[in-house]
């Protein structure tokens, strides 16, 4: 029902391919998503608590498109890429990460760690102006 509603609002296009329905965002849908992502951010508190938030994931190859989408949103949220599947942020972002992972159906592949000390912290502090 929800998909039909989104289609009626011209936010997605539903096509039938190989006896399966394929969903794609329309131009209007992409614009709406970008607008929502602007509001979907990590709030910056007045003072940093000295802890790093580390997001680690190992999303299988069969879910490659979702993995790439997850990476794009992490970048848009402002997380720093330490390695291909390891991202760091100085502020609390657990809710945003798990909301995103839940919507992409990749939650079982995500780990969220809070750490007080990281090697290479000097570079990260500079990256986040801390």
Image (cartoon, rainbow, N blue to C red):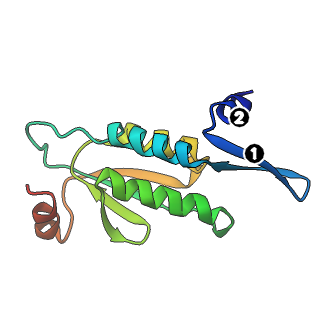
Say which of 46 and 13 sits in front. Answer: 13
Q: Earlier in the sequence, mark 1 or mark 2?
A: 2
Q: Residue at x 55, y 43 (%)?
A: 29
Please indicate whether residue 33 sits to the left or right of residue 7 in the image: left
Q: Position of residue 47 (x, y in %)?
A: 8, 40
Q: Residue at x 21, y 64 (%)?
A: 118
Q: Which residue is mark 2?
A: 3
Q: Position of residue 88 (x, y in %)?
A: 29, 58
Say which mark, if any, is on residue 85.
none
Q: Position of residue 58 (x, y in %)?
A: 53, 64
Say which of 105 and 111 sits in front. Answer: 105
- Above or below residue 45? Residue 109 is below
- Above or below residue 94? Residue 60 is below
Local secondary structure at mark 1: strand
Q: Which residue is mark 1?
A: 14
Query: Residue 42's quadrant in the figure?
Result: top left
In contact (CB < 8 Å): disc 1 and disc 2: yes
Q: In which quadrant is the N terminus drawn? A: top right
């Amino acid at each position: 029902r929800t998909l039909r509603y989104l289609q009626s609002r011209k936010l997605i296009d539903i096509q039938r391919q190989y006896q399966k329905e394929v969903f794609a965002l329309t131009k209007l849908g992409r614009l709406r998503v970008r607008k929502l992502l602007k509001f979907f951010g990590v709030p910056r508190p007045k003072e940093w608590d000295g802890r790093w938030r580390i997001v680690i994931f190992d999303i299988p190859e069969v879910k490659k498109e979702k993995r790439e989408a997850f990476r794009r949103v992490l970048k848009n949220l402002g997380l720093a890429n330490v390695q291909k599947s390891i991202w760091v942020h100085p502020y609390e972002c657990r809710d945003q990460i798990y909301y995103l992972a839940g919507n992409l159906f990749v939650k079982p592949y995500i780990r969220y760690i809070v750490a007080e000390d990281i090697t290479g912290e000097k570079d990260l502090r500079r990256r986040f102006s801390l």
